Amino acid sequence: MRSEAPGPAGTAPAVQTGQGDSATGSSEVLHTAISHSIFSSSISSAAERISAILPQEEMGDRKCPLLFVQLNELLSTAAGLAWRETARWIKFEEKVEDGGERWSKPHIPALRLHSLFELRTCLQKGTVLLDLSAHSFKEIIGKALSAEPEVWEPELRDCLSALLLRQPLHRTTMAPLRVLTELSLAPCRGKAKSCPEPRTQFSETPLKEQLRNQFKKKLLPGAEVASIMVGEVDFLKKPFPVFIRLREAVTLGSLTEVALPSRFLFILLGPQAKAKAYHEIGRAMATLLTDELFQGIARQAKHQEDLIAGIDEFLDELTVLPPGKWDPSDRIPPPRCLSSPNKRISMRLREWKSHCNGNTTAVKDWPSLAHLHTSEELERTGRLFGGLIRDIRRKAHWYRSDFSDAMHIQCLSAVLYIYLATVTNAITFGGMLGDATANMQGVLESFLGTAFTGFIFCLFSGQPLTILSSTGPVLVFERLLFSFSEDYGLDYLEFRLWIGLWVAFFGLVLVATEASHLVQYFTRFTEEGFCALISLIFIYDSLKKMLSLAEAFPINWHYRADDVTLYSCTCNLSGPGHVSAGNNTLSPPPTALQQPPAALVALSRAQCLGRGGHLLGTSCQYVPDIALLSFLLFGGTFLCCTTLKHFKSSCYFPMGLRKLVSDFSIILAILIFCAIDAALGLETPKLLVPSELKPTNPMRGWIVFPFGANPWWICLASVVPAILVTILIFMDQQITAVILNRKEYKLQKGAGFHLDFLCVSLLMIFTSVMGLPWYVSATVISLAHMESLRKESTASAPGEQPEFLGIREQRLTGLVVFILTGVSVFLAPILKYIPMPVLYGVFLHMGVAALNSIQLTDRVRLLLMPAKHQPDHLYLRHVPLCRVHLFTFIQLLCLAMLWVIKSTAAAIVFPVMLLALVGIRKALECIFSLHDLSWLDNNLPAAARKEAEGKLHRKQEEQESNADEESELMHRQGREINISVN
Amino acid sequence: MRSEAPGPAGTAPAVQTGQGDSATGSSEVLHTAISHSIFSSSISSAAERISAILPQEEMGDRKCPLLFVQLNELLSTAAGLAWRETARWIKFEEKVEDGGERWSKPHIPALRLHSLFELRTCLQKGTVLLDLSAHSFKEIIGKALSAEPEVWEPELRDCLSALLLRQPLHRTTMAPLRVLTELSLAPCRGKAKSCPEPRTQFSETPLKEQLRNQFKKKLLPGAEVASIMVGEVDFLKKPFPVFIRLREAVTLGSLTEVALPSRFLFILLGPQAKAKAYHEIGRAMATLLTDELFQGIARQAKHQEDLIAGIDEFLDELTVLPPGKWDPSDRIPPPRCLSSPNKRISMRLREWKSHCNGNTTAVKDWPSLAHLHTSEELERTGRLFGGLIRDIRRKAHWYRSDFSDAMHIQCLSAVLYIYLATVTNAITFGGMLGDATANMQGVLESFLGTAFTGFIFCLFSGQPLTILSSTGPVLVFERLLFSFSEDYGLDYLEFRLWIGLWVAFFGLVLVATEASHLVQYFTRFTEEGFCALISLIFIYDSLKKMLSLAEAFPINWHYRADDVTLYSCTCNLSGPGHVSAGNNTLSPPPTALQQPPAALVALSRAQCLGRGGHLLGTSCQYVPDIALLSFLLFGGTFLCCTTLKHFKSSCYFPMGLRKLVSDFSIILAILIFCAIDAALGLETPKLLVPSELKPTNPMRGWIVFPFGANPWWICLASVVPAILVTILIFMDQQITAVILNRKEYKLQKGAGFHLDFLCVSLLMIFTSVMGLPWYVSATVISLAHMESLRKESTASAPGEQPEFLGIREQRLTGLVVFILTGVSVFLAPILKYIPMPVLYGVFLHMGVAALNSIQLTDRVRLLLMPAKHQPDHLYLRHVPLCRVHLFTFIQLLCLAMLWVIKSTAAAIVFPVMLLALVGIRKALECIFSLHDLSWLDNNLPAAARKEAEGKLHRKQEEQESNADEESELMHRQGREINISVN
């Protein structure tokens, strides 16, 4: 009502009556309600008033300081009346639970509409002091009570003042270590005695526990405090509501649990028997103050009516839940993502403006969706190597900072984590490659190659956060290439050298022609096809390997314990032929006496075979226990990986520990099952690692010579497979690069698609000459790298997700990781203890996890679900179920086709078929509408432009659909992160 | 505004202006808001008006007919404007999703407060026709349009009428079978062509698809329909809202998706560019109509103002969510349990009354909690056998109906289900008992005993829904008794006979003295201690058995494939001593030639040992593969049981199938793993079942003789163990009986605690004489029995839980189950294929499941959780965390004590220790407050009375705390159902 605290006594009555009679105020409520109503299009008085208080330009940029709101309630305890903190708000509500020793989970403050109306009346009828100057709580209370001298008799005033100046009891948060010590010192005693005795005298300086309060960490510097005090007293006849805004924020001693400057105060004392109503009004006030829009108004308000207008605007935006349909004691957890307050405010402002101007074409302000698929890095320059030059220029600018930015402790933990992940990857892929290529490339080669190429890439690449690794597709191709070489009698390494050289050449051509631009045609459809195929191959291969183990270590299923005396295996040196060794049945009848052959010798199997002998007997062909133990290890590793991976989302143990366990799940599972295997001591098949620094396969050297083993024309013929490999490498590298350089990672230093691909191509020459595996970017491990370098805001309100600030972009972590990997070559004596079934279990896990991470799997699951149980996916809200199923069906068909091609003689052309997916995706536009495709897939560049234009024409529901799309985008982004197999 | 449809033209202007100017109406909104406000205690005009419309007595009893609300919207399609169903309500909202072919999940209708205000204005300014008489939709439209003849020009009226009379398009639900046929006939075609072409002409008779609509099943007979029609048209200059209540509910042809009589109609047509606002107003109207209180008002309203008053009351009860904290597009799923509408209405009425009378002691109306622990069946009569006589009298009255009530198809499926469960139980417990007692009681005895005792019990007991079975505690005791007999050289069966006879005698004494009355002292604390101990014993035993299997079938961990030739086992008949058979190392050096012993004979192990020979060699002591396969079977069965059990809560496949799989999870798991075992063919240890009808152990007969094998004084000495068994049987039987006879099962025929215990005691005589296992009530299987006989309301609104009507109480299902079990004795040839590791896996599952079902486990988990991740358990809201932990800790201590006692020589007294738990629980009242105990446990009878009295004194927040307690009770009941191991 006034802009300065108690001035001349003449203004006091005006304060008292406030906005005059309630009828005027009430008409305003409905005015607000039917502002921009269907009956009239005039703007309400409240909105007018607010747009006058809040100038538009100010709203966009300026951010209100964070407000911490605390509710103190007057409760009767054993020691008489006492103020106690019962709830607090930053963004969401936290309540002190019944026992008084526990904060509830943060939840959305659900109010009764009734209490909001009552609060409105309080502000109308009560004392409102705006821009009060005071330096202590005592002074504020004094001024507030003397604002209306005629109402309060002096003794009542003293009573009230004494009551308000009692020391409130807070529920402060202690550091975890302190909690432990306190607990050990004072074990639980009955009836909450562990709380300190309430001080009766208000302290003007902050208390010890206030200063120690760990909760302060959640508040940004510059945060302010609003205190709300409500309670019932026996000596009051009518309620006494005061709203105070301080001109200067002042720290009011021990009033609130954190010692920060206070800005707002709301006091409501009243007669007895209404404690619940006062509590609810206090909550309503707190909720209002946590609303950004109302807070802005409260900070700028010049009159009491401005506050009322603020409430009216707040009312207008409320969502309401009907009574009886919903239990009000249920607490609604905070949503995972919220639209930013600034956006909401500017939306409201635009609404008012448009109503004022009668302008309904506010639609243009909305960002079109067309920007999603074009980024500056992928624009064509039209010149040879134009993109590359631009990449180099862009990255050179940051090169120095790529090292200086790494000076942070976070980088150390990132190095450790990524090192272990890289080593695990090198071991698993090395093992698989060794398997696929008869050890032409083994674990040792894998270590060396990873270390060298990774190091070089981190030093020169455009996106040094990328981690190079062997990847699934390359592994599949190597397997195909090796069996092709075997079938046609070619020297594998020499053939591969020529392919590598050609790939490097084609790579250069692609870089020169800025082919990375084509990346925009790789939509979800292509990515999913690619990913699903690789995942299936992983799963299939690991199971096939396990079955082949069962063949290598056959079990005697017909073993009878009673016949133990009839099983034997002896070495027969006398000559072959007279007893068939492969006899599966127990040939001699159990009762007959068996004549031992003449030349039975106690030689071991190797010695016997070495001397030209033959194994003779019923147990020679069987190996007991090993196959079954292998299956136990395989299943155990798989289950252990999966369980540990999901440990992050369980609610046991502190977050840090869970994250650690989850991040290291694979290495932990490997360690656990290696230990079990070692403890049992059975001769399970182990990983093959040379103990010296020489190639795994003794038949090859370190350098592959280009000629000699194969006919001369192979160097030309290898152009054909080279084209295939080029397609494969290009797709694998660029799909990963697109995922890593997504907008939501807020990368500052930009991407370098062309430069990255140049590095990969040139490294192909080196790896081919040395006979090392080929390397491209690995999605999962690179994402883990970025994830471990996240910068996040430390201060976030309880219940709110911390704000993501960006990635610590630098080259140093990668470099250190690969140096360490290089040093690990000398790990061979340890690595040879890893049993193969454990590695197969890890691969099964990787395949299943990757398959689970794609939307295709979700949609396949939908096929099995009755409609009413289907989850509330956004695409299901917008695309008819039968279209969704059709899309899934087409994808499965493509997948089946790819699988058939992979399994037949034409296997080697499968990279081309992957590329064909892009074409099929284009053809889908004939079957599906662009609208459906935009929900089920991303749009291709041309279609995206068309769709975006279409959007501009849709005027109605623009806001809603935009909001929907935004959250759907978040949704999509959340899902696609794990899309590829590393 | 008027109680009869268009009367004299003179009233029309009054309709037009409605409630006069909006200022009057708006003041009313705030009046409502500040009715019973903190500033005044007068009742609002709206509440006064409502209590006048709704006489109190009517509200309590009369239930409004169910109302189905459908929202039709005018949408522009390719064929021009068309009405389409876009949402429907019974209790919760279901929206037609974007594609137009899918219903959303039922959710709570969250509204904008704004649209409620707009709706209020609509009802004030628009036409309201109450008690209109009409027989067709056309007639209604005609009357509505002519209600205000001066406003609508004739051509406009024709336009509107034509528009309103277009045929709406519904989204009807087809029977699953029909969907399949439709899909196969018309596979998905582009752009929703599968929808039938919209009919343009409104049909006055219901359409085919309306009559076929499966959704009708959800509606109770007598349900009525409210239709809401909103849309924008270009020829209107201002909105045209009409609210119509029909005097007689009339079926309005094809207006709504179900062909039921319509009662209410709300039409809102208006100028263009506000479609979203109209939609929201339509939703608001629908939500209002689904509110029981408003619906009652709308049915009784005599004037337009009555409706407005109804809205105002509705507004007053709203829960609001602040803007910006919650994404309005998130749909809130319906809560699991809701307070009944009647209770809410009576609460509101009481509130008004109390305000009117100034009476604040409405508290007494609330039910006290004291009734929870006293039930009529457990009252003492004070006479010998008084309780028993009362039980017999009560049950005799229902005896005839116990057979006639079984005539329902549901009983057939219950029989099949419970039969399989009983057989599984008989097999598993029989196997375990055989193990524990050296086959003195085996599977065959288990079958015979189960069949006979179950049959007798079902025929004569007080609660024939109970299923008798061997239970965990009895199994534990038998194990202890057997080892005691072994240790002291007693004849187990004879000793047991005397114990059984004494137990029967003590049982009679307990029945005579009405000891079942003590059941009230078994609180959650005792039950949990009991259950946790048994569960742990199950888990421990199954693991111990598996380890003993590994010892019985030792694995050669030092086996080397290369040394295959050195492993052998031969029979040495020449004489013992010269080569040690147990030699663990490979004794002969591999290179040396081994001289074959002279007397090596090819005899099987049994033959060799039978002829006095010795086994000689390095492989004699090992059995390959069987131990590992056993572990695979054990782990597999456990995982399979657990997975299948949880299949019910997955969302794949229809509910019926999931429930079936989940219910039969154990038998399915057993079948699957028996099949796997049989397919592999290894000689795993199998269940021992005699193939003829003779005792499993050949050393015993069918009748146990009382004297002969043991000293004569044993018949007296067995009094001591008999007391222990009596305690055990009493606790086990009565805890189960209490759980089965809980109030929430709504049993009509009453319990029979005394009669049940008499039956159990008398059957002890029979089983002891015949040497069969002892039987008491099994909680889990009995609960499954009751669950399979649930009567539920078939019609429940989407999103609403079906109402539970009671249990089909009868004796026939039990009788048939046990007759079938008896016949199954001849299953022996099949049962012998069951491997023991599979049974151990089932037992592990049972132990883990029982352990997981008790609150103690939840609280132990809390110890591992950081406070902020802890689930929102109600007891955590009310009891300080440190007190909760203390309670958990004491329980764990008791458990540890029990375990120690069980494991030492004093093991046999453990039933007494169980009883000691009751004493410890009593002592806890010194450490914990009654308030804390009432949340963590139930109260003991004396304390419960005290606590209930205490409650009456707490006036404030009475309503809220009652609501809390009620839902907490539901919560508790939900948890405790699985409290005991069967």
Image: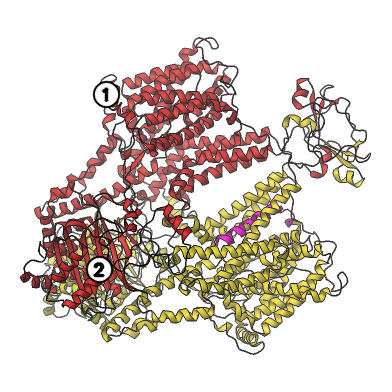
Chain colours: A red, B yellow
Residue at the spot of label 2: A165
| Residues in magenta, as a range | B831-853
Secondary-structure class at tag 1? helix
Q: Are marks 2 and 1 on the same chain?
A: yes
Q: Nearer the viewer, residue B460 or B409?
A: B460
* Label 2 crowd bin: few (<14), some (14–19), many (20+), radius 10 Å: some
Tag 2: amino acid: Leu
Q: Is residue A484 left or right of residue A391?
A: right
Q: Looking at the figure, which quarter contains the N terminus of chain A?
A: bottom left
Q: What amino acid type is highlighted by mark number 1?
A: Arg
Q: Position of residue B737 (x, y in %)?
A: 60, 74
Q: Nearer the viewer, residue B271 or B677?
A: B677
Q: Nearer the viewer, mark 2 or mark 1?
A: 2
Q: Quadrant of residue B703?
A: bottom right
Q: Secondary structure at mark 2?
A: loop
Residue position marked by numbered label 1 in the rendering: A393
